[in-house]
Amino acid sequence: MISFEKAMEIIMTDVRTTGSERVDFNEALYRILVEDVFSDVDMPPFNKSAVDGYACRFADLQQPLHVLEVIAAGSLPSRGIGPGECIKVMTGAMVPEGADTVIMVEDTEETEAGVIRFTSGKTATNIAWKAEDVKNGDKVLEKGLLIMPQHLAIMASVGCVNPLVARQPHVAVLSTGDELVEPYHAPRPGSIRNSNGFQLAAQVKDAHCLVSYLGIIPDNEQATQQAISHALENFDMVILSGGVSMGDFDFVPRIMKQNNVEILFRKVAVKPGRPTVFGRTHKSYIFGLPGNPVSSFINFEIFAKPLLYRMMGHNHQPGELSLPLAMDLVRKKADRMEWLPVKFSGEGSVIPVNYHGSAHIHALSLAQGLMCIPQGISEIKKGAPVHVRPI
Ligand code: AMP
Ligand code: MG
């Protein structure tokens, strides 16, 4: 059995990336950028008025100002201004030469036709200066970025309409178990509905990868052999649930080996999910996750998701929070790192959800985060800080 940290190190060593493709930037949301993006413009591109008002000289604010012309956003002033002059500008319009201040319309009154007066005691400059935000040639987006809506605004502004992004890993999800029926059918006596096939497929999509759910594999060697060899040939990653423990019909690891999978670990000191199997072939990765749905959920989150992101060149940071625990917590055994479903209280503390173990999907469905208790820690006092990954 290896530690969580060792397992992560093994998973994240020599990761094969999936290559890249150009897409229309409008299709690039949640893709991973694989080249830096540079600006081809200054931002702002010219001295720009930040308000609707009168562009003038700060030194002239105590005197009447002659309005030379009115400039809409998108139009150019036909001239500069001199002493005692101003040009009316709309928000976003170019500030004329000679002006160092734009006084807001609200701070003025028209004293006679074509003449205004500043009526307020003070004013900001109200000018966004050329290139004060970004200079032409500046790097504006860094490779490895997970593209969010706000990054599309940058791409649009710098004309990056065909960004180079990572190809999405295509992941096969399979469920093993003779006891499973698909949710469309009523369970027979002794059987249960397959829940984690769908949960895992959704987790893959949530990691912005492509997924094919390949169905239930019955617990026989021939069916498992066929399914695994097909999946390894055709997908960048294969995720199986079930069949990795010590039961008489748990032969997933053996069949992985028969398919030239180099098994890199078989047991990790985490709870839930000790019998997690991880391996690779010359072209694919494979995870055998334990069958209980809370285990498969957590093990996907902690092991498979960072790898999927890394395959796309993104360094996934799960955004762990450090918050006080709302109550004392004691556990009998501390030989493994443990992940527990928790909620956040209104006061910013962490409350463990009533949880009966790794089959208890209802507890997971109520959770807002996963709290991590490190290996070796058996007691945490109320108020002590704990680490939580929001889910
Ligand atoms: P296994 O890892 O195959 O020994 O399965 C452990 C437990 O998880 C058993 O109680 C299984 O019935 C259950 N289980 C396995 N696969 C699934 C699944 N796809 N959906 C829900 N429960 C499952
Ligand atoms: Mg099973």
Image (cartoon, rainbow, N blue to C red):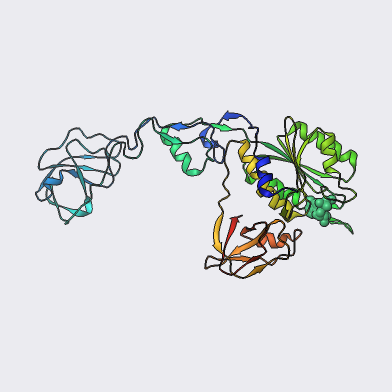
Q: How many marks?
A: 0
Residue 215 falls left or right of residue 48: right
Camera sees residue 181: no
Residue at 12 percent across and 38 percent down: it is: 82
Residue 243 falls left or right of residue 205: right
Percent x, y for residue 66?
A: 12, 43
Percent x, y for residue 17?
A: 63, 32
Q: Quadrant of residue 277?
A: top right
Which quadrant does the C terminus fall into? bottom right
Camera sees residue 360: yes
Please name whichever residue, 147 or 374, is drawn nearer the observer in this view of the structure: 374
Residue 135 falls left or right of residue 37: left
**Looking at the image, is 296 positioned above or below residue 21?**
below
Please name whichever residue, 84 or 128, is drawn nearer the observer in this view of the structure: 128
* Residue with the most extreme front position: 376
**Looking at the image, is 145 positioned above or below residue 325?**
above
Percent x, y for residue 24?
A: 53, 32
Percent x, y for residue 360?
A: 74, 61
**Looking at the image, is 378 positioned above or below residue 269?**
below
